[in-house]
Amino acid sequence: MVRQPKSRACLKTLINLFNKIYKMEVTKMMTNKEIRAVARERLSGNWLKMLLVNIIVCAIIGAGSYFSTVKEAIYITLGMSIISVILVTGQTNLTFNIAKGKEWRAGNFFVGIKEYLRSFGYNILIGLMVVAIEIVFVFLIVSNSVAALIGKPSNLDLAQSIKHMHPENIGLAVGFLLVMVFILILIDLMYSMVIYIILEKNPDIGIIKSMKYSRKLMKKRKAKLFGLYLSFIGWSLLSILTLGIGILFLNSYIMTSMGIFYVELLKDKAELADEVGLVSHNDFVEMNEYRVVDTESLEVIKDEDNDNNQEHKEIDKDVEEGSEEGQNNEDNQETEKSSDDQDK
């Protein structure tokens, strides 16, 4: 009887440890498989609506590209660049609201002037950054090629030039190309969350701050996002086989998954998000309410935490009652022993 309270105390300690581990688990990001499953659940009933939006966007961008090619006018190209940013921003905002669990509304395609300007400014900055990197590496590749062809005939075509180059120079050129691709992918991953930060409509967070916070959010999470990108390769191949029609569906699937990734990222780095004032978490539907049962279905467990807490409270109550019972038994034994001593 004396050891029973100790065993129950150990049980209580294990329960408290389980609670801590459980709380740590729910704050972690979902797996990419779970993110895709939630995206499909969110898009349920919205696939055809998003298909119509994607068709309209593709038609406008396609027509603009055609006219800019035929006319070869700078103002048409510039105008189409602005229109493309507006359209893509609208698509992103639509899927972002779907990712947050909000109902589909055509009005979500439109955002404020400030958001459009910030989105356009960000695209200009990132475009200049990419062009600068490409210029540097193209210069390195061309310089390497020219150095390798010194003394060779000047009238060689590309195939003949490569044939006359030393294997070391070819390897160096390929190395430069791979490094350039790696850096461009890294930049895309680092700044992939900028558009979502912009769409949160925080007046105190401009373009530069959005890029800074995106880098912080994506720290040690770039590989996970890259894995999410790669997980859509199979769907992309299937979309090509449908003569591109499948891409109209796939685009919404990918963009909604990206929105969910951002929401999960904010939960994963809640301290950072609160510190810099990125979002108000009250606007989000709690993604912790969903547990992936398999790749095709989701089980809502909204009340599971409450049930677990109630169960733990009952166990804690039993532990306390057991402790009191054990203590009372000890007191009774001591009282009986004292009475026996007095009788003797």
Image (tube, rainbow, N blue to C red):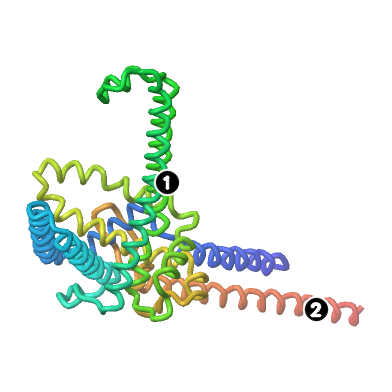
Question: Which residue corresponds to the image point at 42% horizontal and 50% vertical from the top-left?
Answer: 186
Q: Earlier in the sequence, mark 1 or mark 2?
A: 1
Relative vertical location of residue 160 with respect to residue 91 in this rendering, above or below: above
The quarter of the rendered structure image containing the N terminus is: bottom right
Question: Which residue corresponds to the image point at 36% horizontal and 58% vertical from the top-left?
Answer: 126
Is 334 left or right of 148, judged from the image as shown?
A: right
Q: Residue beneath label 2, please?
A: 336
Helix, strand or loop at mark 2: helix
Relative vertical location of residue 259 with respect to residue 105 in this rendering, above or below: above
Q: Position of residue 103 (x, y in %)?
A: 20, 75
Helix, strand or loop at mark 1: helix
The quarter of the rendered structure image containing the C terminus is: bottom right
- Callout 1, which amino acid? Ile
Viewer-proximal residue among 190 and 5: 190
Determine the image quadrant of residue 261.
bottom left
Q: Residue beneath label 1, please?
A: 183
Relative vertical location of residue 301 with respect to residue 40 in this rendering, above or below: below
Q: Position of residue 292 (x, y in %)?
A: 32, 58
Question: Which residue corresponds to the image point at 30% horizontal and 75% vertical from the top-left?
Answer: 115
Relative vertical location of residue 18 with respect to residue 225 in this rendering, above or below: below
Is 47 left or right of 254, judged from the image as shown?
A: left
The answer to whether mark 1 and mark 2 are in CB contact below 8 A is no
Question: Which residue corresponds to the image point at 52% horizontal and 76% vertical from the top-left?
Answer: 313
- Callout 2, which amino acid? Glu
